[in-house]
Amino acid sequence: MEGASKEKLSSVSNLVTAFENSRTPGAAPRVHGLEAGHHHPGCRPPSPTGPWDKPTVEEAVDSGPRTVSRRYLSSLKNKLSSRDWRKSCQARTCPGPGTQEPEEKRIIQELLETEQAYVARLHLLDQVFFQELLKEARSSKAFPEDVVRLIFSNTASIYQFHAQFFLPELQQRLDDWTTTPRIGDVIQKLAPFLKMYSEYVKNFERAAELLATWSDKSPPFQEVITRIQSSEASGSLTLQHHMLEPVQRIPRYELLLKEYVQKLPAQAPDLADAQKALDMIFSAAQHSNAAITEMERLQELWEVYQRLGLEDDLVDPSNTLLREGPVLKISFRRVGPMERYLFLFNNMLLYCVPRVIQVGAQFQVRTRIDVASMKVRELTDAEFPHSFLVSGKQRTLELRARSQEEMISWLQACQAAIDQIEKRNETFKAAVQSPEGDTQEQELQSEELGLRAPQWVRDKMVTMCMRCQEPFNALMRRRHHCRACGYVVCARCSDYRAELKYDDNRPSRVCLDCYTFLTGNVLPEDKEDKRRGILEKGAAAGSEQSLMCSFLQLLGDKWGKSGSRGWCVIPRDDPLVLYVYAAPQDMRAHTSIPLLGYQVTAGPQADPRVFQLQQSGQLYTFKAETEELKDRWVKAMERAASGLSPGGPNDRDLSD
């Protein structure tokens, strides 16, 4: 029993706010701020101490109620540790030197005293602030009555519950403590009603906003509040401070009841009931915790929606923001990456552009990608490190993070959202899947052409059409993208239209191969049997299955018009030949060099990054970006020149 009790006592509520700490600096800590001014004979709530007349200027200055910022009100995270709170309470409730009260009775006495002070605050909220504001709204019509009711929510129900039921029960039990030294049974009867605090906590954020808005908007509204705050009954505290009291109250019950259970002797008759009461109070606190968590989630979600200026069809309160942050978009046409911003929700990824003039919404949503159809993977690109691919039905994006750690974090967050969606759909899939469902699923995965947006090959990665291998130029043969496969093709090879499901079945530009696959139409041009030339070995395939590949500078007159920079590849399936392409995605090399018999030597220049291939009058000069890259190329070429093929025990992949 003792172990189970300690385990329950270890749960510390996270709702207690720094209410006492927010008071005037230098003042002694007070828990029962209104006790001196309010007594409760017969457990009746206090009456107002007089008419709420408008104070003089001097009185208002002397009283000086402190205001609370809206950030403080909306946070609810300014916690007060149980040790500090208990210390401030015990300063008021510890008996004198001559008394020998049992510890458990002194805790119940403290519970009663704090309950009396709490009922006084509830009386001030419901019978004074609420009633006076309601009266002013009815008489002056300066602000709506509904605003007043929304601000105070279900304060009246909470006040009646504590004033008419809970406080009298506590008072009666303490009066009969000599004959009935127990409290657990009383709290058990009343604890279930404490769950009504969830409604108050859920409404607290909106109430604070309405209070701040109408205080600025309506002078009569602010005048009533200022008049009451300046009164003695308010204790020099603002309405916002008083509204925080119900948010703190259940955690304080939990703290006091925990200590009461700890102080009870092992054979105390109230131990079992008190432990059960603590469990019920803990359950009520959990309801309030859940309400606060939900309130904070909705507030955060609403702020994100405001930053995005979203349409109504995207504003869904059931959404959960998982991650947000800046990224760089790798463009398939422009040279440099562009600044973008991502918002990852549990059901969608929003690809956004920051607005230049941030009036209203801060971002413009460019693309929405559904998580249910999304795929993510890391990209291996020497030019753009820590980049990754996001592929969805609506669009495919190549993005670059600011660091490797940030890229991994994005990949993990996206994959976790995808896994959660798939897990949710597992039951449904199992219910409707046919016996041959596995085969059907594999066929669908291998035939996604037109079902989801492809990854577009970047313009600068190719110098020739990826279908007919004719070189591009600015006048006669311009670059186009096939909307089905993402290849860069010429106008002649992309002069076809096919309906794509990911684009709402609108006819889109596609290449001949995709047109044939999507429509089933075989054109005469497709029947020609062209023999593949020796140079027609795709660089894209070479980079994925290569012994070595990277950019190298091509020095000397030997290269002619091929250019000063080439994408060089030694393929795994042709390990004795060096292929040189104008760009990494070209389908045809402009030069191929059989490496067998060549000598690999250092260049005549002083630059240690230069090396040469030499054989009977043939001389090719290269320059790597780093010495380390040059050494790897020299090693790979020497092996090929010696006729050594890959597959030995010491072989490893030398490619970037």
Image: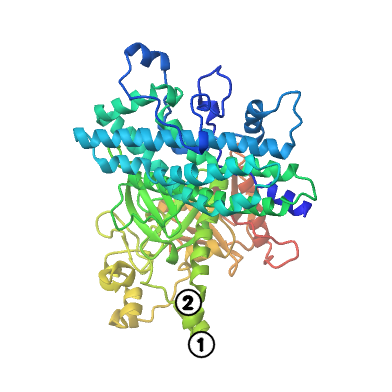
- Residue drawn at point x = 41 percent, y = 27 percent: 238
Which of the 4 image quarters holds residue 52? top left
The one nearer the camera, 207 or 33, is: 33
User: Could you say whether the residue bearing mark 2 is in a helix, strand or loop?
Assistant: helix
Q: Nearer the viewer, residue 418 or 483?
A: 418
- Residue 625 shows up from this direction: no
As drawn, 168 above or below 652: above
Q: Position of residue 432 (x, y in %)?
A: 46, 82
Q: Amino acid at mark 1?
A: Glu
Q: Are marks 1 and 2 in contact (CB under 8 Å)?
A: no
Disc 1 to disc 2, C-alpha distance: 16 Å
Quadrant position of residue 276 = bottom right
Q: Is residue 548 left or right of residue 511?
A: right
The residue at the point 63 percent across, 26 percent down is 92
Could you tell me which quadrant the C terminus lies in? Answer: bottom right
Q: Which residue is mark 2?
A: 428
Q: Dot 2, how many residues are within 10 Å of its Cα: few (below 14), some (14-19), or many (20+)?
A: few
The residue drawn where x is 74% and y is 51% is 269
Q: Decide which of tag 1 and tag 2 comes sooner along the chain.
A: 2
Q: Position of residue 343 (x, y in %)?
A: 42, 50
- Counting from the top left corner in percent of width and height, residue 319 is at 42, 56
Left or right: 471, with 38 as reference point: left
| Residue 329 sits above or below residue 313 on the image | above
Residue 476 visible at all? yes
Task: Determine which of the numbered discs, if any, sits on residue 515 in the image.
Answer: none
How far across and down, in percent of the image, does residue 321 sit? 45, 51
Residue nearer the viewer, 39 or 148: 39
Residue 125: quadrant of the picture? top left
Q: Which mark is residue 436?
A: 1
Q: Residue at x 61, y 66 (%)?
A: 575
